[in-house]
Image (cartoon, rainbow, N blue to C red):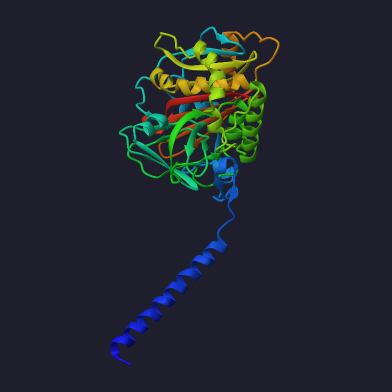
Amino acid sequence: MRPRNIALLTAAVVFALMVQLVVVVAFVQHVRRPAVARAAGGFAFAPAQAFPMQAPDELFIAPGMQPGQPITREELQVVRCGPAKEVKFEVSAPVTHANLSVFFIHGPAAAAEPKVITLQDALNQGLATVHDQGMLSVDNRSGVPLFIQGGDIVKGGNQDRVLPYDYLIPAGALRSPVAAFCVEAGRSRPRGNELSSSFEISSAQLPTKSLKLAALHRQQQQDIWNGVNQLQTTLTNKLGASVRAQLSNTSLQLTLEHPRLQQAAQPYLEKLAALPEKCNVIGYAIAINGQIHSADVYASSDLFRQLWPKLIHAGAIEALAERQSPGDVAPPSAETVQTFLQEAEQGQAYRQTAANQVQIRQESSRALLFETCDAGRGNQMVHRCYLAK
């Protein structure tokens, strides 16, 4: 046989063997691949929790933080700085629609207001990325610290998540780890045309006191899934039609975006979303069916006003879910809200520290108080979250 023919025959044999090898490898990978189910609407998803979830204890001790340490009242006065240290807040009379009452909290801004960018603004401007690689991390490409408020929901990735704790991500920081819980059971793959590697939207806040307590206080993933399901069921019953999305019927974010729910919440927003003209409004408290649910106070009026649309929308959703009949209960007085805030500050204090922030948690018989301070600015208060038990 001629040398040329021998070479051609040899090449053909080698090529055939390579093709067979590729087929065998592809078959083995197919057999090993996790089973994929088909959800309503034709969306494919892998079995739940394909990405490892953090254990509750790991979530509470957020990346870069030390376990909370009890501190005395004297130590607390040294740690706590900013306007909350010596000045009492003034609570205005409520503005009410149906069963939801809003109390605006007035007070001086910090002596040197912290310049920060919110998570929603940073994502909208392309100045931040929240990466999803099972564990979450954040890039801050802005020139100021990035403020993440506990309860911020990020949409997309491999499952919608809620970031349960406040964070101050330093300017220019890359891949800063953050703790997260899932608010969409059963999905662990991209949804529709969304990116699987990151989140592009953070337009909503965790909407109910019970969900916030599950995330911030009990740190229980199953409680959060149960709470999301219960909220969706309750809203469906209240509105007389489903508010679950076909694309993913377990997604809290898609429920919050549902047109039916948006329409039902609109009367609350029309009555309550307008802010007072006074420039010293630095926070708010809400009462539903006559009971105080929560309050948030910030270092500056500017930061509060940036976050207000998210906050009042969450309050409206909570009020819809708890709407009673036949009538609405009268709201508590401003003095009662003032007392609630003061009593929360009397609870046992615990301190956690990270590279650029100090977090204080206080617990009394009636309330929890979470306070975030900027360690780079003399522990100046950035945000206080009050939750009624």
How far from the left and from the top, in percent, is residue 261? 56, 23
Pick whichever, 296 or 127, lies toward us.
Answer: 127
Pick whichever, 101 or 106, lies toward us.
Answer: 101
Residue 382, located in which quarter of the rendered image? top left
How far from the left and from the top, in percent, is residue 264? 57, 19
Q: Residue at x 56, y 9 (%)?
A: 96
Work out which residue is located at the far bottom of the displayed protein and give it.
1
How far from the left and from the top, in percent, is residue 274? 46, 12
Work out which residue is located at the far right of the displayed protein and give it.
326
- Quarter of the figure that contains the C terminus: top right
- Quarter of the figure that contains the N terminus: bottom left
Q: In screen coordinates, is 6 left or right of 282?
A: left
Residue 121, located in which quarter of the rendered image? top left
Q: In screen coordinates, is 389 left or right of 247?
A: right
How far from the left and from the top, in percent, is residue 119? 41, 32
Q: How many numbered tags mark residues here? A: 0
Pick whichever, 93 or 39, lies toward us.
Answer: 39
Q: Residue at x 61, y 19 (%)?
A: 320
Pick whichever, 294 or 232, lies toward us.
Answer: 232
Residue 52 visible in the picture: yes
Q: Is residue 51 above or below residue 77?
A: below
Residue 366, located in which quarter of the rendered image? top right
Residue 90 visible in the picture: no
